[in-house]
Structure formats: structure tokens, C-alpha cells
């Protein structure tokens, strides 16, 4: 449930999440989607992890040089 909810929110509010857990937690509180504090923190933590992994993937793609055919 945490992963599904997080991915839906990231798709909907992609510019609002970043790599800072506290920022993501405050943003989740502002959304007021009616989840418990524990669930809000889990979603904020997972969103932080997803955003960080996406940034790392983008950096790796930029470093790889395309092969000449």
C-alpha cells in the first residue's frame, strides 16, 4: 500500500517531492489526504528513496557514452 500510494503521489505531484525527508513529510501533511501519521512518514520516506534513486539513474545515464555504430 505504501509503494502504490507513493508512486501515485509522485506521478501526480512530481515537482513537489525532493531528496529531503523533512520537506516530503511536511508536503504530505499539507496534502491532508487522511492517512495516519505513521503512514504519512512511511510514504514520505519511500518518496525520498525513489527520488534519490531516480537522480542517481539520471546521473549514470549522462555519464555513459553512446556506442558508435
Image (cartoon, rainbow, N blue to C red):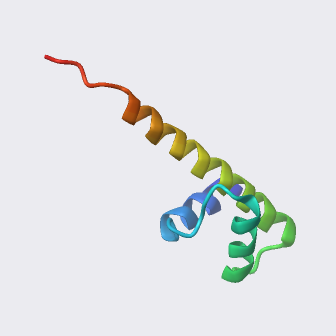
Q: Residue at x 74, y 59 (%)?
A: 21
Q: Picture coordinates of residue 47 (x, y %)?
A: 65, 56
Task: Give the residue furthest to the left.
Answer: 69
Q: Picture coordinates of residue 19 (x, y %)?
A: 64, 55
- The relative height of residue 29 versus residue 43 in the rendered view (above or below) is below
Q: Residue at x 52, y 45 (%)?
A: 55
Q: Nearer the viewer, residue 46 or 55?
A: 55
How many numbered discs, if any?
0
Q: Residue at x 60, y 47 (%)?
A: 52
What is the quadrant of the C terminus in the image?
top left
- Residue 62 as seen in the image, left or right of residue 21: left
- The relative height of residue 17 versus residue 57 in the rendered view (above or below) is below
- The relative height of residue 67 versus residue 49 in the rendered view (above or below) is above
Residue 1 seen in the figure: no
- Residue 69 as seen in the image, left or right of residue 16: left
Res. 58 image quadrant: top left
Q: Residue at x 75, y 80 (%)?
A: 34
- Residue 4 as seen in the image, left or right of residue 69: right
Residue 7 seen in the figure: yes
What is the quadrant of the N terminus in the image?
bottom right
- Residue 63 as seen in the image, left or right of residue 26: left
Q: Picture coordinates of residue 61 (x, y %)?
A: 39, 34
Q: Picture coordinates of residue 5 (x, y %)?
A: 63, 63
Res. 25 image quadrant: bottom right
Amino acid at each position: 500500500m505504501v509503494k502504490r500510494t507513493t508512486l501515485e503521489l509522485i506521478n501526480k505531484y512530481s515537482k513537489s517531492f525532493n531528496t529531503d525527508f523533512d520537506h516530503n513529510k511536511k508536503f504530505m501533511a499539507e496534502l491532508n489526504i487522511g492517512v495516519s501519521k505513521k503512514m504519512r512518514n512511511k510514504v514520505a520516506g519511500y518518496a525520498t528513496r525513489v527520488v534519490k534513486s531516480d537522480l542517481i539513474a539520471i546521473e549514470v545515464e549522462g555519464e555513459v557514452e553512446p556506442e558508435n555504430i
